[in-house]
Amino acid sequence: MGRTTLLALAACLLAAAGPTRAVPPFPTPLPKAVEQADFVGIVRVAEVPTRPRAGFRADAPPLVAAKPVSVLKGDPGGRLRILWQTHCHSCYVRDPKTVEVIPPAVGDEYLVFLAKAPDGAFVRFGYEWHFHKMPPAPNVRTPPTADAWRAHAEVSPGVAGLGEAVKYRFTATRMTAEPWAGDQPNMTAEDVDVVDLARKQVLTVKKAGVRKRVPLVVEKGETYAHEIDLTEAFGITRPGEYWVFRGGASEDDGPLRFEVTDKLRKVGGGR
């Protein structure tokens, strides 16, 4: 099925669902997003304008000042002026004057993908890669899910020695009395992206693993898990900070992070 046919099919499906949803562009792979954006990095919010009585709207979002913390692409010095436009005009057909924009708080950290505007300020790069709040712990996240599930994602260990296996693990626990049953595909390395921050590159998969679908029944209180050996799958052999994305990014989905060091000294006889 070609791109035009897929777009037409998506338009029909979305039109049937309601008039407020538009057809978004095809997802941009992470390497292409990094290549095309003017700035990619983690920033700490330093200044937010006073909220007007009617709140901020998508037609006039707040201009936020932020300081770079870790930079994958762009100038790491000074402050950035960022037009905090969280509303995706290509995804929703709504009057921007009716869409409220919730500004970040001073001190919050976000991974941002930005394009530079003619006036020197920065704006969101695209519909998929834009503002992504960093989790409180660098290597652990509890993703938002439906009430029927509780999800947990982590990379472990958060600090690893050279050659030590670092694993990505995703679990989902059934929270409702009604069991879930169906064919569940396993995750492989092709489902995640890994960034080598020290060398400013998105890593390529060296060993993807085998995709399988298995029949699964998950009762209330039971948990199913996916696990990927990142060290093996991406051939990680050098010290540095690494970022891990799963399936692109959402507004509340900044990367998990871990560090590989050649200065790790384990104490005692524990494994």
Image (cartoon, helix red, strand yellow):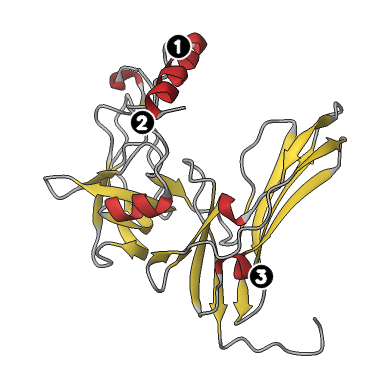
* Three-letter code, disc 1: Ala
Residue 84: quadrant of the picture: top left
Dot 1 crowding, Cα within 10 Å, few <14, some 14–19, many 20+: some
Q: Is residue 57 above or below residue 216?
A: above
In this view, the residue in front, 1 or 60, is: 1
Residue at 28% over, 56% down: 39
Question: What is the secondary structure assignment of the residue under circle 1?
Answer: helix
Residue 95 horizontal side relative to residue 23, left or right: left
Of badges 1 and 2, nearer the viewer stands 1
* Three-letter code, disc 3: Pro
Q: Give coordinates of residue 7: x percent, y percent.
A: 40, 23
Of the numbered discs 3 and 2, the one sitting upstream in the chain is 2
Residue 144: quadrant of the picture: top right
Q: Give coordinates of residue 68: x percent, y percent.
A: 33, 62
Q: Give coordinates of residue 263: x percent, y percent.
A: 57, 88
Q: How many numbered tags mark residues here?
A: 3
In this view, the residue in front, 170 or 54, is: 170
Question: What is the secondary structure assignment of the residue under circle 3?
Answer: loop
Q: Which residue is mark 1?
A: 15
* Three-letter code, disc 2: Cys
Dot 2 crowding, Cα within 10 Å, few <14, some 14–19, many 20+: some
Q: Which mark is residue 88?
A: 2
Residue at 67% over, 73% down: 165
Q: Which mark is residue 157?
A: 3
